[in-house]
Amino acid sequence: MLERRLPERAAGYEHNAAIPGFRTAWERAEVLLKWAAVLLGCSIPISVALDNILLGVILFFWLAGGGYRRKLAAIRGNPVAWMALALFALFVAGSLYSIGPPREVVDALVRALRLLLIPALIYLMREPVWRERGTAAFLASMLVTLVVSYLYWFGVLSSNEWLKGTRLDPVAWKAHITHNVFMAFAAFLLAQRAHEAKTRWESIILGALCAAAIANVLLMVPGRTGIIVLLALFVYFLVRTLKGRGLLIAGVGLVALAGFTFATPNSMLHRRITLADEEFAQWRAGVPPEATSSVGLRLEFLQNTLAIIRGSPVLGVGTGGFGKAYADRFDGTGAPATQNPHNEMLLMMVQFGIAGFVLLAGLFATQWRLAPRLETPSETAAARALVLTFAITSLLSSTLLDHAEGFFFVYMSGLLFAGYRVRVPEAPAQRTR
């Protein structure tokens, strides 16, 4: 159900399934690399260690495997791949003038290596069947996560060393911010599949799973970023599928959700909104934020990070230089110390000046603009949902710095935009005399 049946052969590309006709060992190895990429989609919501192993395997064998002419052709014709390579090049260039200690510079460069997964997957996942397998692997992993979350919430599972959840915070393998962002995106994919389902029962089952994922985000797991992402994605879904009527339904739904929230003061959503309001009021009143004040700390980091940017707006402080720049400016002032401004846009500007903001925003804009050129409407919808997810999340978290969010963004970017096809202009009609 999650993996739709698609033809193995994509028009204009080599057929490289494991059948007679394979000519080289590398072609067989490339299929194994594709399965490694599929497995990565499954591991991102679950295992940090497996993510890193699979990334190393994919990048090493992709770079060492030959076929460079085909690989360069796939990358050269894909603007998303070029934007990813430009971002990686910015990290490399920034390491040459960074004020950060060598350990933090190297750590930032290692994290930036994930960007190379985008062009690697754009080549590897050209065929629709592999892109569908990768998406299905992510969805399957999120459905397991959803089951674990409900088991915590109903008290069937108790806290243990293998999982992060509790009954009050029923997550599985990731913290609640990451859990809710991933679950919101999974809910969107399930809604899209329910909408496109070919049978009534398939639509009902997928719709029920989508509803369970929505309830998980809104009512169970206390991750406010994921709630914002979920609401944005479903406004987009309704407008995309129902046009103007969808916008009206979205407006009515948001009003109904607001009414429900304020009519149920004991609900998780009401408590999280009330807490956010209290933390914001305390910060505005000049009360130093406590370690548990999520909103207060973010606003404090925002204000202080903007001050660092004003001090070096053109080149920034270099790759991995944020921690030292923050400490140099605010040590001894009573401001809370941090290595993470919880805002990817600002983190890029601190490190690389205006170029950091331009390239990251340019990547999002390129993805949004090119999404209609993907092979299917479903891929177009998922690609634009990905842009919305990470444009929002990047204003509230350091998405490329954070492990799971960074891996997820580069993985889905490479997977979806492997389906990009260059639009060939039609030849002008010849005049008849």
Image (spheres, rainbow, N blue to C red):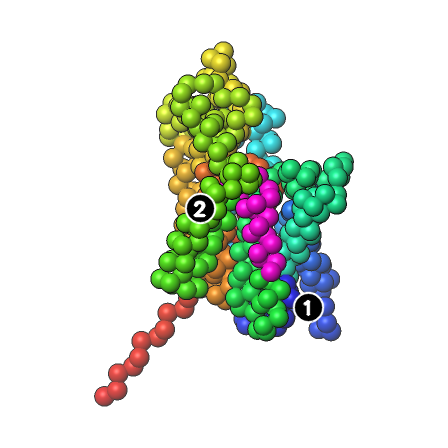
Residue 392 position in % (x across, y down): 46, 43
- Residue at the spot 55% in from the left edge and 36% down from the top edge: 401
User: Quarter-wise, where is residue 156 in the image?
Assistant: top right
The answer to which of 261 and 36 lies nearer the viewer is 261
Residue lying at 76% horizontally and 36% vertically, measured from the top left: 161
Give the residue type at disc 1. Answer: Ala
Q: Is residue 31 visible?
A: yes
| Among numbered discs 1 and 2, the one appearing first in the sequence | 1
Instruction: Work out which residue is located at the far front of the displayed protein and give it.
Output: 263
- Farthest top residue in view: 332
Residue to which mark 1 is pinned: 17
Question: Where is the N terminus found, in terms of image quarters?
Answer: bottom right
Instruction: Please tell me which residue lies in front, 167 or 22.
Output: 167
Q: Quarter holding the C terminus?
A: bottom left
Disc 2 crowd, CA 10 A, few/some/many (<14, 14-19, 20+): few
Q: Is residue 367 above or below residue 326?
A: below
> How many marks on residues?
2
What range is drawn magenta here? 208-226
- Name the residue carrying label 2: 259
Three-letter amino acid code of the residue under disc 2 = Gly
Q: Main secondary structure of the magenta part?
A: helix
